[in-house]
Image (spheres, rainbow, N blue to C red):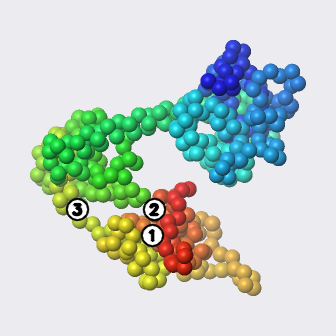
Amino acid sequence: MSSLSEQIKKNNASAFTHSGKFHADDVFSAALLLYLNPEINISRGNKVPEDFDGIVFDIGRGQYDHHQKDSRVRENGVPYAAFGLLWEALGEEILGQELAEKFDQSFVQPLDNNDNTGEKNELATLIGNFNPAWDAQGGNDEAFFQAVSVAGMILENKFERYRGNERADKRVEELLEAHEMAILSGKKGKEESKILVLPEFVPCQKRLSETEIAFVIFPSNRGGYCIQSQKKEYSLNYKCSFPVEWLGLENEELIEKTGLESAGFCHKGGFLMTAGTLEDAIKACEISLEEFHEKPIIVNFGGDFSVDELLLQLPKLQSAKVVHIDFPELPELEMLGIYGEILMERQEWKAAVKDQVKMILKYKPEAVFVGNNTFAAYPVVHMLRKKHIPVLTLAEKNGEQILVRIPSGS
């Protein structure tokens, strides 16, 4: 236990932060302290009292403040805010080293970055909305602690989710190992190598995207079994989906089409099916694997045909079909010499970009290559990255042109 943790958990523990307008940084900092000690007394003010004996954060230029000129910055360039400084000292005790680092990267750093740079963050905006209106009478301590209460619930749920995901990861590895042993020993036929049967539902989609497993079967809480198609790694597409003629059917209609007596329902999206017996569930997967034949597609957005040769050298995509989509025409502009501004309203522009992305996604591409036109490509690339579609562009290394994937993310 760290000395800070001991200080937080002692009887009559107290903490102090700034008054006035609050942000996600000081709110989540307070929620973190209260998570470790629900009895800690947190007070706010414009200046730290000289005789204050407790934890001071986001004010006072101490260890857990970040407003000084020489405040700390992470190795990846994200500056610490008070929440990050406190999490650095307390996170390992709460989640363990590995999970604490993951939590810092995915949850703490975006809030720290928002507080230091103003970069947009929806959670920070939500917390900020607890501040009273500019012309409200009286103080805002009550609103601050309302926000802290919400932040506390978010933290508790996040921590439990991280712990649950860790338990799930361990369970999935055990099940995968047992599955592989059953295939190698002959207890299961080779036709079942891409079908994983779970004794209970376990979150596993991310891990299984890295494997050859195409279907997962598990007991349904409504009785019978659920069958889920598994997505390819870094793709919105499934390794295998159910036959088209099954999609959207249920009960007698589905039984007639599949020939499976306990077939229950097949989602129109082709990623979920139910069956009354395990045998029928496995058979549904086997039929789907046997009948599934889908040629992968790469969309060449605005690039010329000379790039196609490179695209067809991508791993696992040598047999892909390349579909060309031209960049959209330049919209109407208001010209001021060599400078032009789009005459579209903001919503009209957003709708046009959305339509362009929709046109690309209708092909269900495994990857999208973008040509050299920043104006046309950037807004589309931005939306594709948020959907984690692999987006490729050209770069040069050692005098040779290569394909480079633009990292995903919002």
- Amino acid type of the residue tagged 1 in the rendering: Val
Q: Residues within 10 Å of mark 3 (few under 14, many from 20)?
A: some
Q: Residues within 10 Å of mark 1 (few under 14, many from 20)?
A: many
The foreground one among 180 and 64 is 180
Q: Residue furthest front?
A: 398
Residue at 52 percent across and 38 percent down: it is 98
- Amino acid type of the residue tagged 3 in the rendering: Phe
Do the CB atoms of the residues marked 1 and 2 lie less than 8 Å apart? yes
**Real-space CA distance between mark 2 and mark 3, rounded to the nearest whole angstrom:** 22 Å
Helix, strand or loop for disc 1: strand
The foreground one among 298 and 5 is 5
Q: Say which quarter of the image contains residue 11.
A: top right
- Determine which of the numbered discs, if any, sits on residue 368 in the image: 1
The spot of residue 58 in percent (x, y) is 76, 36
- Determine which of the numbered discs, if any, sits on residue 292 in the image: 3
The spot of residue 96 in percent (x, y) is 53, 32
Q: Which residue is mark 2?
A: 389
Sequence order check: which comes first, mark 2 or mark 3?
3
Sequence order check: which comes first, mark 3 or mark 1?
3
